[in-house]
Structure formats: structure tokens, C-alpha cells
Amino acid sequence: MGRQPEELIVFGRSLGSIPAIEFAHRYPEVAGLVLESGIADPLERVLMRVTPGELGVSLSALQEEFRERLDSVAKLRARRKPTLILHTQQDTLVDVSHAERLASGPAENVRLVLFPEGDHNTIFSDNRERYVAELRELIELCTRGETRYAPR
């Protein structure tokens, strides 16, 4: 049973945030987007493990390719539908600065929730009540066909 993009809420966690952002970018009518412990700059993550020389390319060429294909922040800035960004302040795998960069889009369309408890792999279990409440609010917003979060 297929669904229309406007009936979907896309979820991406950690590395999965990259294809989730891409999907929402290619299908801007997607009702909602949830990013948990998301990655703002995939190149930054790659360069933690390998050098451009090891890949046989220059840093500038690598930067250009990533900018053209995987600029998650720019894709989210162009988004006009609700986006919920969930991250822990103490994430030791993906720094909280990634969430802050991802949330730099239109304020009325983006909700950034930084949990004081938990880590990369315990974000849900350590923050279950508020986590579920935030998801519920996004789902209700999308179900009503609204595109903006109410100010808090």
C-alpha cells in the first residue's frame, strides 16, 4: 500500500539522518522530518577517519563534491515543512554542534530539542517521556496539515 509524500513523516537517526534529509529534499511535500542525533556535515565525519590523500583526491575537490551532493544544512534551510531535531547535550559520538547547525533553518519550521540526559545510544531510553511528547506534537502538527510550530 503506497503513500503519498504529504502523508509521510521521515525519520533519520545518526548516519541515517543523511538519507532522511536527502529524501525530504527530493520530496519537499513530505509532511514532517525527524532527525535524531543527526549529522550536519558528513565530510567532517569522513575526515575523522581518512585523509583526502588516502582517497586519491585533494581536499578542495572532496569539499566541492560534498557541498554539491551532501550539504545537509543547506537542504534543511530550504525546507518549509516541520522538522524536529532531537539530540543529547552530552552525545559523545556526534557532537551537539551538529544538531545546532541542522537547526539553522527557518525557526517557525524547526524545533530543536536538546536533552540534558543521555548519550548517542541512550537518547530515547533516558528521555522517553519528553521524546514521545515531542514526536506526538510533530505528528499532530502534520496531521492537521500545518507547516509551522507554535512559539514556546
Image (cartoon, rainbow, N blue to C red):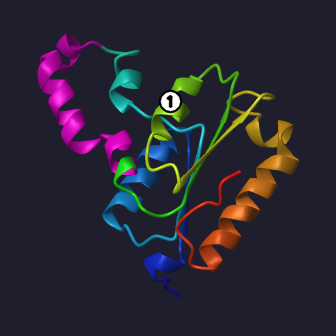
Residue ID for mark 1? 98
Instruction: State the image coordinates of residue 65 (x, y, percent, origin top left).
Output: 17, 35
The three-letter code of the residue at mark 1 reads His
Q: In which quarter of the image is residue 144?
A: bottom right
Residue at (71% x, 51% y) in the render: 152
In the image, is residue 67 part of the stretch drawn in magenta? yes
Q: In front here: 89 or 60?
A: 89
The answer to whether residue 86 of the structure is visible from this angle is yes
Instruction: State the image coordinates of residue 49 (x, y, percent, origin top left).
Output: 39, 16
Residue at (53% x, 25% y) in the render: 97
List the single residue furthest toward the front: 151
Instruction: State the image coordinates of residue 5 (x, y, percent, origin top left).
Output: 44, 76
Please tell me whether residue 101 is drawn above or below residue 91 in the rendered image: below
List the single residue furthest toward the bottom: 1
The answer to whether residue 56 of the structure is visible from this angle is no
Q: In front here: 106 or 95?
A: 106
| Magenta region, residue range | 51-76
Answer with left or right where residue 94 lies relative to residue 5: right
Is disc 1 placed on a helix, strand or loop?
helix
Please tell me whether residue 23 is drawn above or below residue 38 in the rendered image: below
In the image, is residue 32 part of the stretch drawn in magenta? no
Q: In which quarter of the image is residue 44?
A: top left
Residue at (41% x, 24% y) in the render: 45
Residue at (20% x, 26% y) in the render: 63
Q: How crowded is mark 1: few (under 14 residues within 10 Å), some or many (20 or more)?
A: some
Instruction: State the image coordinates of residue 142 (x, y, percent, origin top left).
Output: 60, 72
List the single residue furthest toward the right: 129
Q: Quadrant of residue 46?
A: top left
Main secondary structure along the magenta-highlighted residues? helix
